[in-house]
Amino acid sequence: MPAETRVRPVVAVLAFCGAVVAVMQTLVIPLLPHVPELTGSSPAAAGWLVTATLLTGAVFTPVLGRVGDMYGKRRVLLASLAVLTAGSVLCAVTSDIAVLIAGRALQGSALAVIPLGISIIRDELPPERVLPAIALMSSTLGIGAAIGLPAAALVVEHFDWHAMFWAAAALGALDLLLVLWAVPESPSRTAGRFDVPGTLGLAATLVALLLAITQGADWGWTSPRTLGLLAAVPVVGALWGRHELRTASPMVDLRVSARPAVLLANLAALLVGFAFYANSLATAQMVQEPVSTGYGLGASLVVSGLCLLPGGLAMVALSPVSARISAAYGPRTALALGAAVMTLGYVVRFFTSHSLGPIVAGATVVACGTALAYSALPALVMRAVPAAQTGAANGLNTLMRSVGQACCSAVVAAVLAQVTFRAPGGREAPTLHAYLLIFLIAAGTALAALVAALFLPSARPAAPVAPAAPAAPAGSAPAGTVAVTKSEPAAREGT
């Protein structure tokens, strides 16, 4: 098949897979207020439909990225999509909260599809096509979330809620068929032994951190459980880091991750993830506040989701623009510009949060900045790591976005719960100042991402772990040896 006719299906299929996986992250948010009644469970148990997805996504994203580097990215991509489909079917056939949580955990593990897709793009596409393709692939995290919320809200309001999960299962099955048809297996492999202790240490550290962040408000920030988990994070993390530095084939190469280009790109990913998620959470809740609060619009669940749709469409349109900026001026410039636009968007939101049109406009400006920033992050990472570590490195970068979103969720919930007033009718409601404070915090976070981007070092070639060697069967070469058959796109800056 000619290269041009083959490239387009690969990019389109991988981007579709990324968007489907991103939809899964926000699929149940419109359903959450109704889950206790529908399943006979408590609100705390219903919250685990989000927490379980977050935890498994955080753990499996870097792990499966590493597994893909070692054993084949297409193979791991197919396995991830199969697990997503199975989890969707499990949710579709039950109303039991424990089974629903298990199904959502399976759905969350498929977040690794996005860094795996970015790695496949790097391996398979000609150099001149790589930047636009990874820009689109990276933006699917925001695109899927923006499309998923209104779509899920429509289902919740007009159909049986199980239909939402049947649709997710159908999309997962379609993804599997499309990948089997269009996506080739990558010839690049990282040899060595799979790091089981490193995997368990990483999982323990992430679970402790994210459980404390996501459950701290319900458990109490000074409760023994929350404080115990927070205390465990540096202890377990230090032991894990010590092991990773001593093993020959680590789960996460901390020496590579400590390079300023990688470290600052991951910090920027965390900050951009925080700022992006504040836009989604605050917009959806703010427009639904009753008119009696003095600032709320009393909008329906569907309308609140549709407020984010223009931002999702803008992200689709701007991903190639970000790629052109990265190609012309370097991904560092694209990231800095994206963070600056996000900051500007929150300034707009601070002064115009009184009617629907300006709210949608401000949310769309933030989404435009998110598109520029998200699209630049994988290019920064790829220019800073050896080709054989692309999957693991992009998995870690995607993980940092998820951690940022988890931190944002906790901060938004805390602000809305603490800055309140007694609304007409005796209802305790967040004040307008609560939302404005969220916008200020998000603007400060985006500004910090801009600073991190400006401190990224100038371009220089990534130091290889070992000399490149001809393709060989996995496991037949010394640890660290890779087979690379594609040339890297020229970089002007960003590492």
Image: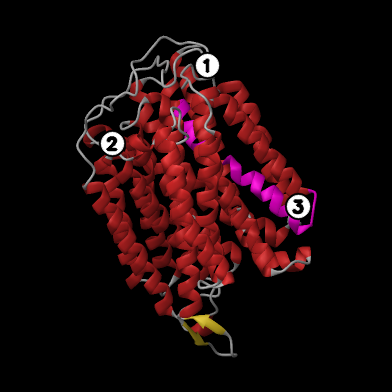
Rendered position, 125 above or below 92: above
Could you tell me how far apart the alpha carbons at marks 2 and 3 are, in whole angstroms? 44 Å
Could you tell me how far apart the alpha carbons at marks 3 and 1 are, in whole angstroms? 37 Å
Tag of residue 99: 3
Give percent across and percent down for residue 7: 46, 21
Secondary structure under badge 1?
A: loop
Front residue of this view, candidates 290 and 224: 224
Crowdedness of circle 3 by 10 Å Cα count: few (<14), some, many (20+)?
some
- Judge left or right: residue 379 versus residue 195: left
Quadrant of the rendered structure where residue 468 is? top left
Q: Nearer the viewer, mark 2 or mark 3?
A: 3
Type of colouring: secondary structure
Give percent across and percent down for residue 328: 23, 33
Rendered position, 49 above or below 421: above
Please name the amino acid that badge 1 sits on: Ala
Magenta residues? 93-120
Secondary structure under badge 2?
A: helix
Please name the amino acid that badge 3 sits on: Val
Please name the amino acid that badge 2 sits on: Ser
Give percent across and percent down for residue 186: 50, 20
- Determine which residue is flagged by label 2: 326
Q: Is residue 103 magenta?
A: yes
Q: Nearer the viewer, mark 3 or mark 1?
A: 1
